[in-house]
Amino acid sequence: MSNPETFGTPLGLAPGGVAAYSSDYDSASEKDYPNRTAFRSYCDGIYMGYKWQCVEFARRWMYVNHGYIFDDVAMAYDIFELRSVRNLNDNTLLPLQAFTNGSRRHPEPGALLIWKEGGEFERTGHVAIVTAASPTYVRVAEQNVDHQSWGEGRDYARELKAGVTPDGEYWITCSYGNAEILGWMIQTDDNRYANPVEEEDPELLLLKSVRHDLPPRRNSWLNIANSDEGAFVDFMGGHRLTAETDEQNHYFVIAESAESQLAHASNELHGLFMHATEYVLAHEELLRRFNLPASVLPKIRQSWDNRLNEVITSRFDFAMTPGGLKVYEYNCDSASCYMETGKVQGKWLEAYGIDDGHHGGANMSAGLVEAWKNSQARGLVHILRDDDPEEAYHALYMEEAIRAAGLKTKMLIGVDGLGWNHLGEVVDADGEPIRWVWKTWAWETALDEIRILLEQSENRPKRYEPDRRRGTALQLSDVLFQKQVMVFEPLWTLIPSNKAILPVLWSLFPNHPLLLEASFTLEDTLKSRGYVEKPIVGRCGSNIALVDADNAVLEHTSGQFGAKDKVYQEFFPLPRFENKYVQLSTFMASGVYAGCGVRVDRSRVINRDSDCLPLLVVKDKSFLGEY
């Protein structure tokens, strides 16, 4: 195969004159594509997707040729679950039928061809537009496959082998042997041979609380020779996942359908939060709501504009109840519970002999390793943490993933011993320049240092920069805000992690089924249903008030964020089992679902001290029958 065409080069014209472009990201020019915004594709002011992904092409082709598009999706394979497209001329919904590979309804020009996740299309699946179909072949137009010119006069990228059975069933095979086609989708009222729209049993989308009758097979079930597990045992005071003695045999169960819903919701929400982040950074009046020092805003924008500066991991907090699945917030900056979810709950289930499913974080460690492999980090990563036992095992768990990705690490506790070299670089005690940082500290800790510094300064700079002339004693902000230092999670995560993003999301995606109504002011609609008052930069459940529809305060937590600006979010209570409220958390790796876990507390507000309990994922049939 010849070399790929440069990113953005037209590869061919699909029917209707719709161009497909090379998405060879390695060749993308920083001059032509200097920031994230430059990678967003619009047609007539309507967002099509990320340049030049397969989903972007499919939506753009539909819009140009028919005036309708399908809803934004997290992954290409998610399209196969959609059942409508939106006509943008009158904002009406038109039926979209799905036909599984092997259907008696044959594909036709204009159909969407959908691939499963896996093989050549690992993690995402794929979508293409059918340009021609015969009993022996299907031709497709597409983006983000091999980045090669289609050839003179061709309106398609690839030709796939097809066959028809004596019963009229139409089958297609992919030219990549490790990729599998789900089927095709056609905008039509005719649902003959289409996949039926099945109503999912609502019982499959709930949590169940279970207690195990037998003791663990071994009293010592965590390997203390592993640094992270040894640190966890020290923190917990033994081989236990919860501090409460009567909770040692307690775990929760969800069905595979529920995990699938959580994964889909998390992937979709990550996209929504990224939309909202860009929107905030483009609207000064909204950005002021986030109460960030003006002198750091240029650095936040620079961080966002760095098209390769992605998150390693982040966490969504959900309530899963008979009333539906709702997200409370997105913790993109220094979230917790990675190790409990990715490792400890699996060890607990193994120790108790519970093996009829998989634990919620079974793929999380592998996801983190892959995230580090795909990151910009090279060589040595410095891990910065506070002198806190809980941060110790979190940091050691992440260190394991960083090293598994082929990178070197150094663990730094506090900033003592750090200094400046003659080039103005921050160096560690061995004189090694700090280039890549993963931290357990929140960005707000560094911002508070900057706020104090600015209050003491007579001339407030328009753009904050650390000043090495203050001597060798460094603060956290001196390290994290250095030009030469790339930090994970990046500075722009201050925006989606700030609770001020919640009203922005609601304004951009009103009545979205996963969101709760939120506002900067206490509206009557919230008062009538009950609401939660949150500080915009609070952490660990601090300074939160829960108020019911009768204006009675159900819960109020204390903390250090009481003076911060507030937002108001619709009250949607957590489910309660026995005497505990239960929150589901999902974890992302590079913006993609990587695992889930539960946190429990007697309080309605999950906080730093709330316990993690094991979460088992079982097959749907087992969930309905045995649990």
Image: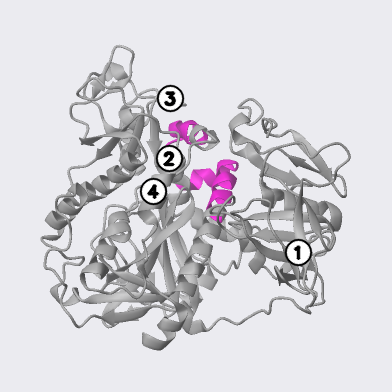
Q: Amino acid at mark 3?
A: Pro
Q: Amino acid at mark 1?
A: Arg
- Residue bearing mark 3: 461
Q: Of residues 600 and 530, which is closer to you in this image?
A: 600
The nearer-to-camera label among 1 and 3 is 1
- Residue bearing mark 1: 86
- Residue bearing mark 2: 373
Mark 1 secondary-structure assignment? strand
Q: Of residues 426 and 527, which is closer to you in this image?
A: 426
Q: Is residue 379 left or right of residue 570?
A: left
As drawn, which residue projects farthest toward the bottom? 625
Q: Which residues are magenta?
A: 272-301
The nearer-to-camera label among 3 and 4 is 4
Q: Quadrant of residue 33?
A: top right
| Place of residue 456 in the rendered image (x, y in percent of width and height, measured from the top left) | 30, 28
Label 2 vs 3, first from the N-terminus: 2
Asked if the residues shown at circle 3 and circle 4 are in contact, with their CB atoms under 8 angstroms apart, the answer is: no
